[in-house]
Image: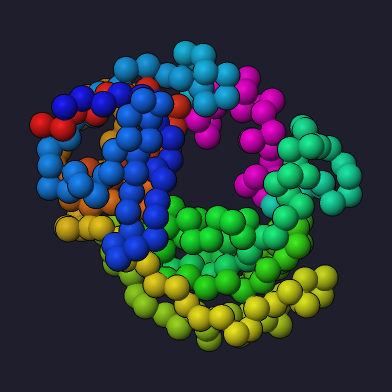
Amino acid sequence: MLYEGVLRKMQTEIGNPIQYYLVFENDFLNMNQLLNKELTIDFIKFQCLNCGKEKPIYRMGFCKSCFYETPLAGDWIMKPELSTAHLDKEDRDLEYEKKVQLQPHIVYLANSSNVKVGVTRKTQVPTRWIDQGAHEAIEIVEAPNRYLAGITEVALKEHVSDKTSWQKMLTNRVEDVNLVEWRNKLQSSIPEEASEYFLGENTETQLDFPVLEYPEKVKSLNLDKTPSYTGVLKGLKGQYLIFDDNTVFNIRGNEGYYVGIGIN
């Protein structure tokens, strides 16, 4: 059976285990049901997620011109501390920026490969943690806008990482830690402007990923170099497909690639 469409990050649903869905324009796949099945992934063409044109993907699923024009790729996306909507100041599209930035944001700790700090909209909890492959996470601060969450993250990065080792996450060489202790230890480092939004009573969230077999080491599938690949699906973690030959495929990292997926 063959399915095809442009790749976007997999949709997920919290559960034991987490459910993964790959959604194309005309097709819908529950990826959990494909575990232990042989899949073939064929690159067909590019399709920019913004303009829809068949142009090479530059970053984040966008062609180069759209990446530098669309508000969905403004610098404040990756660096929340650069948010300016609370000042009524436009970056690329003030209406869109107000819609996204002026809503509750969570500063959190997540353990994917190590303890890291991050920021996400409140509506994206626990989706953001799932996308990062975190097996445990906890909220630290609930700020009323993205800017306050961003400056809190910057302050906490002085004491804890903001990066994840995707290789370590995918091989599952991770240790459980007490995130409540980490949260309490970091409280004094929260900027004064955000200190009133500290969350001191919540508990850790545990996340269970549908992985039958973790790879001992990982090799990443690059569709530009390998436009056709076949392997047996052994797991889903973060936004990665894990195959039986240690190959891993980052769905989010290949957004904007139009592919065919065959179930053999």
Colouring method of the image: rainbow
Front residue of 204/12: it is: 12
In this view, 119 is above or below 101 = below
The residue drawn where x is 62% and y is 74% is 140
Q: Is residue 113 visible?
A: no
Is residue 104 covered in magenta?
Answer: no
Specify the farthest residue to the top.
54
Quarter of the image where the C terminus is located: top left
Snapshot quadrant of residue 89 = top right
Count of picture labels: 0
Whether 76 is among the magenta residues is yes
Which quarter of the picture shows residue 25?
Answer: top left
Tell me the quadrant of the picture where the N terminus can be found. top left
Seen in the image, is 122 located left or right of residue 213? right
Q: Taking 25 as reference, is 169 above or below it?
A: below
Residue 130 or residue 171, whichever sits in front: 130
Residue 17 visible, this angle: yes
Picture quadrant of residue 186: bottom right
Q: Which x, y percent locates residue 10?
A: 39, 43
Give coordinates of residue 143: x percent, y percent: 72, 65
Residue found 59% across the figure and 56% down from its top:
123
Q: Is residue 106 left or right of residue 214?
A: right
Q: For the magenta stretch, what is the residue range? A: 58-79
Image spot of residue 152 (x, y percent): 71, 66
Residue at 55 percent of width and 55 percent of height: 124
Which residue sits at x=45%, y=83%? 178
